[in-house]
Amino acid sequence: MKDQEIREMEWPYPIRWGKEKTVNVDVLILGGGIAGCWAAIAAAKNGRKVALVEKGATIRSGAGGSGCDHWESAASNPCSRITPEELIQAMIRDNFGYNNGVSHYIECREGYDRLLDLEKMGGKVRDIEDEFVGAEFRDEDTKFLFAYDYVNRFTLRVWGTTFKPALFKECKRLGVDICDRTMATRLLTEGGKQGTRVVGAVCVHGHTGEFIVFKAKATVLCMSRPTRVWLFSPGLPGISEFRPPQCTGDGHAMGWEAGVEFTMMEKSVKGEWSGPRSFPPYGTGNTHNTWYACSMVDVNGREIPWIDRDGNILKSVSDRYRPAPGQKFFLKGGGESEFPNYETRGPDILPVDELLERGYKLPFYADLPSMPELERKAIWGLMVGQEGKTKIPILGAYTKAGFDPNKDLLQSYGDGWKSGAFLPQERQLFGLPGGMVNDWELRTNLEGLYAAGDQLFASNCHGHAAATGYYAGRHASRYALEASSPEIKSSQVEAEKKRILSLIDRDFGMGWQELNAGITRIMQNYCGEVKSEELLTIGLKLLKDIAKEEASELRARNPHELVRCLEVLNIMTNAEIILHSCLARRASSKHLHFKRQDFPDIDPPEWHKFVTVRHKNGDVVVGERALDYYGSLEDNYLAHNQDYLQRE
């Protein structure tokens, strides 16, 4: 029996290699995570025929599919003491201007609207069971629960595990054609030429291998940011990154090949969340994000004090949630401007050696039992339990193992909240990373192509994905209403099918894990913490070498492995984008976590700008944009959204 026949006999689904069907829609949504579902809902509400393509199962897929514990983009809620304009200006200044003013203004302006929409769909956003009556962070009239800044109340604690099923149900109700287990592999362009209008996409089904060609008047990219570029373990692929392992930046790679403009792709940070040697995210005692503002003690029970931005020791747990004297409000997670968060003099902030010099003894622990009952309950049970990937592996598993937050301490390992030790060359695209450049309609530089969520540069949280997804969906639907019917170039489709089918035509070859591991080793060695033109150039050469040699030997034995192989090829493309972006910025930058050994000056004025890159006919075109290229935030928002404002 032939090897191909054996492979097909072992596969539980019907194999349809080479089969093809065509689907015509008004708006095509690529990516079924938070942003993708919201984009589909917006387009469908506007009366367009919508298809949503998702590589996993939309009901729980994506970085936010398993939940979120807070909604930080609710500045317009009735309890908030700050305006969307104040919040976005703080976000921009907090990052020295390296932020997406357009997308985050949309988040600040429309985030609360989306939260109310979610509630109507069945998502839980209020303490309707009155579990937290009397808590300082609860508003008794609205039953909203607030996080971080209890005075200004613009960030809400939410039950995010209820959100994705509610979005999925709403998409079905609105008649969105949901194509699960389907991977988009290539954007189709007018005339088959790079840089022209986007008119659809080629997709492959992850169970059957069948091709689906989508023709669309407008397309919205809503896929994840790249992962597994520096961090990957062939033996433990499930914990290689903080985001789900199948979130590999497929949209970035597709956009690059089509000619989309990118910026800030040179920004990366030392590994901060999960990795091959780490503990599960949110599974160690700390003080950040989900665990804010937990008490910390050393092995002798000596409390590590919290201080405000001015260095004053905070005497109570309540004080940790209040701005310092003269500080109007503060942002979660700290910062470098006039809006820094409080910080704890603990393993999360200071080096362990410095704490030891001050007399603290290892190990350090999160001290939940010493906290007020409702504060403890809010951290362990609400925040830990509703945040992504915490309900089962952390709350469920720890509780089953006997952990009791009323009496047990939880040890803090390595660098505290980072959950493990990371090497300087082990990087991640985290903390407002790079992505696609957008205009005020969230359109890319290509006609007919829009972007939302993690697809955008300086992407952020769940609320950002929701707000930008809905926004991009409604603007794409407006474009589709007047756009001409798309014309697909058959030769472009055939070329993509040939590329994909070549991966299954081999009886012997390399597995996807080995190629992924090779890419990460190149990026660690030649695009680590410290960069130079020589290192980056060698890295690019090695990527081209493995693309020509090892990648040409990739082998898929079934549709599942085919998807994994295509993901790794996309990871290789994303690594190329990063290397080109690093070469293009010829100055170091504190705010971009970017060190050039050959250009050591930090943030010189002439480089205080966005550096852009795009792929054009085999070459890389480098450009630049002013950090405030988007102009007046409020004026431009009003100019582009009168129909929404009147309707809402």
Image: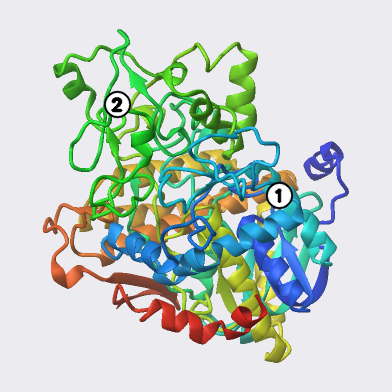
Report helix, strand or loop for mark 2. Answer: loop
- Specify whether 533 is left or right of 272: left
Q: What residue type is labelled 2?
A: Pro
Q: Where is residue 360 in the image (x, y as percent from the top left)?
A: 22, 15
Residue 323 at least partly seen: yes
Q: Where is residue 291 in the image (x, y as percent from the top left)?
A: 45, 32
Q: How crowded is mark 1: few (under 14 residues within 10 Å), some or many (20 or more)?
A: many
Nearest to the observer: residue 62 or residue 187: 62
| Residue to which mark 2 is pinned | 347
Nearest to the observer: residue 647 or residue 80: 80
| Residue to which mark 1 is pinned | 123
- Specify whether 536 is left or right of 72: left
Name which residue lies at 48% across and 44% down: 228
Give the Cα separation between the discs numbered 2 and 1.
36 Å
Q: Is residue 552 above or below residue 322?
A: below
CB under 8 Å between discs 2 and 1: no
Q: Is residue 354 above or below residue 548?
A: above
Q: Which of marks 2 and 1 is nearer the N terminus?
A: 1
Number of residue marks: 2
Report helix, strand or loop for mark 1. Answer: loop
